[in-house]
Amino acid sequence: MRVEPAAVEASGWGWRHATRKDFALRAVDFAIRPGERVLLLGASGAGKSTLMAGLAGVLGGDEEGEQEGSLTIDGVDAREARGRVGLVLQDPDSQIILERLGDDAAFGCENLNVPREEIWQRVRESLDLVGLDALDLRRSTRHLSGGQRQRLALAGVLAMKPGLLLLDEPTANLDPAGVQEVHDAVREVIETTGQTMVVVEHHIDVWLDLVDRVIVLGRPDADSLSGGVIADGTPDEVFASMGDVLAEGGAWVPGRAIPNYRPGTRSVTASGDAEAALADGNKESLSAGDRSAGDRSADDAKAVAAEAAGRPVLSCHNLSFGRGTALGTGIDLDFHAGEVTALMGPNGAGKSTFALTLAGLLQPIDGQVLVAEELAPSPNRREPVHWKSRELLGRIGMVFQEPEHQFAANFVRDEVSIGPKSMGQSQDEAYRTADRMLERMNLTRFAKANPYTLSGGEKRRLSVASMLAAAPRILVMDEPTFGQDFRTWTEMVRLIAAIRDHGSCVIMVTHDEALVDALGARRVMFQERSEA
Amino acid sequence: MSESVSIRVTGTGHGKQHGPASDAAVKPAVSDVVTVSAQDTREDPLKPASPSWFVAKVNPVSRIIGALLLCIPMFFSLDLVSATTALGIEFVLLWIGGVTPWTVCRRTWPVWIAALGSFISVFLYAKVSGRILWSVGWIVISEGSFPLALATAIRVAAIAVPGVILALGLDPTDLADGLVEILHFSPRFVYGGLAGMRMFTLLQDDWRALGLSQRSRGLGDGNAISRALSQAFGLLVLSIRRATKLATAMEARGFGSDAPRSQARISQLKAVDWLFYAICLSVPLISLGVAIATGHWRLAFTGGA
């Protein structure tokens, strides 16, 4: 299957969303020759996704925003170039449109009015290219893995035979095996079709072997026409001259050293004042809480004592967990203060369910999750799942995988003050705690914004901030670094290290080897029982 | 790299013993293994389009038309004979079509509850006909109560049972194809709705996660109604966001323009569909005919006794 590769040209292009005052990006100039494979980089907020949507012609008409300059595919305005461009997006859940695999792959062709026999021929070819040819066309799309879903989305796009293939962080939500699957499928596709390709991705190394050009977008300035393209060239050129700028902007530049925040490397942690601020924040946030500061330091002392005695702050005994049916049975694990534990393993193995069970949110199917006596509301009530919701505050916090699942207030500042307020602080005190948290998380300027309007990285930081405001002794995090750029990632690592060094117990579900390595975390691997 | 010691945690299980952490710097990072049940990687068995081999051959659109043909005439009569005859014929036809009476009853249990409900209400509150046997307040039981109640209950079953059985296993995608190709509904409307319906599963997960997160944020103790309200608001916001993403994905695949669109799947009426219509129409005709012939027929809405 070969397609005619498309030429892309942007000249002085810019876009302002109708609801925003400033342009998302402007003064973008570049010309991509047919068949070129481009990696598009830029700090978060530089408008990469907007540019991709613009190229795909899905930004909408005049009522959705204002365009300046021009953006063309083979000389045709991108908004009119229907079918010449195929876009694969980040979220595997929202790209599957129809119930049956074959129907889903055929959907784009139908919309382009491709004759029926040709549709099915193209569908088979496309599924073959992305390595899904072994699956029945009638198979339900419901139970595909993340990697399979993204490959199906790719096949659906491919069947439209677009001259330009756009990939907007197609692997950000996948586990390492899924990333590899999608990468290999894309390689197969572009080598066969010769399409022009533009890919956006923070993790540069994933795509480095497939791209021959790198374009870097700068953050637009509200008052001037600066911004636009700040670097453009071969990967070697761009990384040599722009490596630091890119890293500063959040890209995962190849060969960049991962910071070391392993236990005992306090000199490093001290460099961020996060730790001091955290200690400070915890003390103050509880000063007017339901327990006095005195009690709290007594608690701290006890927790330290428990740790010194080698006793875990959280442990599971003969635990079976799952929703309805048990995913794992007979699990005994201990978690200690001042320790980071990484729960790792393939997607769908049940790590998140396990994490929710540890956090006292899901009833164990059998066995127990027990919190150290010192930390329990009373010595005989050590099972967090039986606690009141408020009793979890300050004891066990859960940061959800999807930050939006956690938002409960209309303003960022209120969002963060929910925890302290529920713990008995007055409105003013709770706001003070919140403001400190926001400052630390670099979110102060969004205090009055609605949580839902933040960018992905900002939402993630907010969800962590609002959990930390309640100063939990045990913090459970589900994929804290999912889809984060390097800068947010580094902040997150530093923060987790600070929480750990403050004596809290951190349990995180993650696929992120670099994160586990940087923190020197204990690894708990989830493995599927091999079928006999 | 951290050194790793593998400890398999299994059935009988034993806790890993941490030594006293005398020196934090050399605390080893130990790797444990949690064994979980294998994810179901088998091919999902393809679900039949209907429990009946015959209905499965019929176009989904015909199944809806057939259900209407079956039930609409039944609304015009109110006697025991026509209802019973219809229900009897339906059971026999379904049996021939491959659905045993027992399966029919099992799959349509809500219908029988509804039928019982209508029986009780008609029995207790129906218009008086004949001698009054017993009455307390609004409740009046007369001689006519029992036959009328029974006729109503059986009629409810006769109308709803085939409808439910015909709907079982109905594939939404096939129905959408039929609506577009046979009834010429707008593809934008039909496929847009179809894609939206698939999001319900995602929204169920969202709802659950929202509830858990409220608990973890200390907001889970208040009264259940206000909690459900704020959870519902969260769900509304999430569903709008999901819908927006889905719309973008669909638009990126060329959906939603006014340009002509082809269909990957053929949906058309065949001889079997016309046969099916004839069968569906014959059921009420025969049963009404029997009722008229035996002199039991009573037109609904006239209220005459």
Image: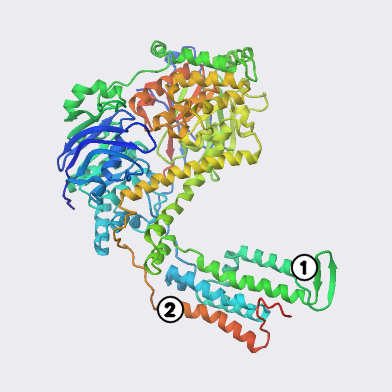
Is B261 displayed left or right of B70 in the figure?
Answer: left
Q: Position of residue B215 (x, y in %)?
A: 58, 34
Q: How is the image coloured?
A: rainbow
Instruction: Tell me which amino acid carries mark 2.
Output: Trp
- Which residue occupies 71% across, 69% down? B119
The local secondary structure at tag 2 comes to helix
Chain under callout 1: B
- In the rendered image, which quarter is residue A529 located in? top left
Between A376 and B206, the one nearer to me in the picture: B206
Mark 2 and mark 1: span between their CA atoms?
A: 43 Å
Q: Position of residue B229 (x, y in %)?
A: 59, 41
Report the residue marked by disc 1. Answer: B124
Q: Position of residue A410 (x, y in %)?
A: 52, 32
- Which residue occupies 77% across, 68% down? B124
Between B147 and B38, the one nearer to me in the picture: B147
- Which residue occupies 66% across, 28% down? A381
Chain under callout 2: B
Q: Which mark is residue B274?
A: 2
Quick one: label 2, few (<14), some, or many (20+) residues within 10 Å?
some
